[in-house]
Amino acid sequence: MDKVIADNRKASFDYFLMERYEAGIELKGTEIKSLRKNSCSIKDAYVTIKDGEAYILNMNIAVYDKGNLFNHEPLRERKLLLHKKEITKLQAKIKEEGLTLIPTKVYLSKGRAKLEIAVAKGKKLYDKRDDMKKKSINKEIRKASKEIY
């Protein structure tokens, strides 16, 4: 059973999420301890590929309070652990117009930190309005069906 640490719910509002991939994260000792205490944020994070390796930027893992001098930098660049074929596939998709890699979830699986990333395309303002309209209509339908029963 996986323990979800951080979830990027705003990603599905701002982007069309197409494909999802699971990647490991290369962490230091105090980072994994801090993750186990649920102190992580991926709200402003994004994934980039350089020199054939994937990295996550702006992922905030809070400083471990008992880490003293061996503590980590909260916003440092972290390497993602993916297969070479997956990285080349993702790199080809990024080169397409308007596609990007967005982290959607950080979780612990069998004691190891994992990151779910999605290939995404940015939504326009009218797409967001349509989503909000559909959401409110569904909410009213559910509310009306509860009143009947």
Image (spheres, grey):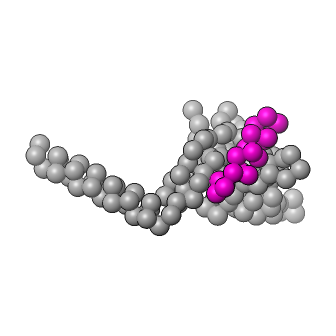
- Magenta stretch: helix, strand or loop mostly: helix
In the image, residue 91 lies in the stretch drawn in magenta: yes
Taking the image as shown, residue 54 lies to the left or right of residue 119, namely right
Q: Quadrant of residue 22?
A: top right
Who's the residue at 72% across and 63% down the image?
58
- The one nearer the camera, 84 or 61, is 84
- The one nearer the camera, 33 or 91, is 91
Who's the residue at 57% across and 44% down the image?
18
Taking the image as shown, residue 18 lies to the left or right of residue 143, namely right
Q: How many numbered discs sit on the rendered protein?
A: 0
Who's the residue at 11% across and 42% down the image?
149
Percent of width and height locating residue 23 = 72, 41
Who's the residue at 50% across and 64% down the image?
124
Q: Which residues are magenta?
A: 84-100
Percent of width and height locating residue 26 = 81, 46
Q: Residue furthest front?
A: 97
